[in-house]
Image (tube, helix red, strand yellow):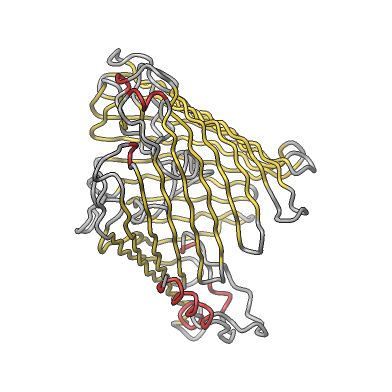
Amino acid sequence: MPFFQALSAASLMLSPLPGDEPPARPKYARLRFDEDWSVLRGREAADFFDPIKYIPLNDSGSVWLSLGGEVRERLEGWTNYQLLDGPDTDGAFLLSRLKLHADAHLGEHYRVFVEGIGAFSTDRDLPGGRRVGDINELDLLAAFGEAKLDLGAGASLRLRAGRQPVGFGKSRVVSAPNWENSPRAYDGVTATFESGPWTVDGLWTAIANQQKYEFDDGDSGRELFGLHLARKTELLGAPGEVNAYWFGFNRSASSFNGESGREERHTFGARAAGKVGGSNLDFDLESALQYGQVGDAEVEAWMLSAQAGYSAPDAPWKPRIYAGLDIGSGDARAGDGEVETYNRIFGSGHNFYGYLDYLGRSNAMDISFGASASPAKDVRLTFDLHIFRRLEAGDDVYTTGSSRFVSGALSDSLDLGREIDLGVTWQINPHLGFAAGAGRFFPGSFFDEAGRGHASDWVYVEATFRF
């Protein structure tokens, strides 16, 4: 495609020459405020964009500004969208996204970070049209002030106030999404305490109300607050990490399996991840319980996620294989004064329940197998197989966002289907990255009986340029 060719040529011109010795520099991060370009202080530019990555604003260089951005283009194509066969269930569309940011450091302890976004979509002739998650023509993705305090003995406290992405652990409960063309934003206050192996995060936020053609505001009727603890430690004879958390979620209106009203839900969970001894085995185990209310109904729900993998870093292509199990509870009986359906809150679904994003961690079980390999430096190939089942025949089938996809009353079957996904990523150079993928969802007997028995295909090609 001409766009990809132009980006590739431009990025080659902007990258350092092979013989150059660039200064130590951070990699471009998914969350751009995680980058620290102060390493360029006093250095000659080794990259075309270095002059805007560190701009001193006083003689000592303690007050400085960093500028940057991202351009992303993604072409998607679908057949039998939402497992339906009709005149408007096949189509292709282009998603475009531009992000620009300014990061002002006011001495060692204070900073202001602002990131704007423009998200656009061509006509999307599929059910739902051009979605809110596809379009946000001009808005703020982040705008926060930060103060970082040195508490002594290696401890620090960081406070942020304003609009900001947030995500914790493996992002199964709270994530800072990047897949969506227009990611969600959180308005509020976060605090991070660090001391040795410990990191403790707290937050109190309102979820911004996403609007296609107007500025997002904080009046979405959704609130998220809580605590997340993380500790680096030794597990099973090798370095690992443990997490524990509590997140509270309030929503002005909600509906689950015959119960509706204001939702007040608390999620308590723990996670452990790491390697096994001196081997190449790795594991990731997480579980959570939910309590609260939906209207007058009591919430009692749970989730369990486990994955085990084996890597061969010294073998050709550095392969890894894995097997996983991911379960979110369902509700046995509709309208009985209890809600046993797990709500994934703001966790990532795309990274766990398949590329097509049809199903999520609510009244579902996903048995997964996969493999990945690197045939060349900065190239990664992936293969994933998902086997989906419903937990409770008395509950609905839910999307990745925990909203109803198909009424559970249409079939007694628990068989939801299978999905196969293929993917490739290639970081061509520090500025330019390429990704492509394809997936097919094979409907199970539930969807056959519910009138959605058509296999659905999805493909995408994506290029991202960062500076």
Q: Identify which residue is drawn at 43% across, 21% down.
A: 414
x then y, percent, for residue 60 = 52, 83
x then y, percent, for residue 234 = 72, 41
Q: Identify which residue is drawn at 36% across, 31% down.
A: 453
Q: Quadrant of the N terminus?
A: bottom left
Q: Identify which residue is drawn at 44% across, 27% down.
A: 364
In the image, 328 versus 160, the foreground residue is 328
14 sits left or right of 454 in the view: right
Quadrant of res 266:
top left
Residue lying furthest left: 214
In the image, 338 versus 106, the foreground residue is 338
423 to 281, vertically: above or below: below
In the image, 12 versus 301, the foreground residue is 12
Residue lying furthest right: 278
- The total of numbered circles placed on residues is 0
461 to 226, vertically: above or below: below
Quadrant of res 323:
top right
x then y, percent, for residue 221 = 24, 40
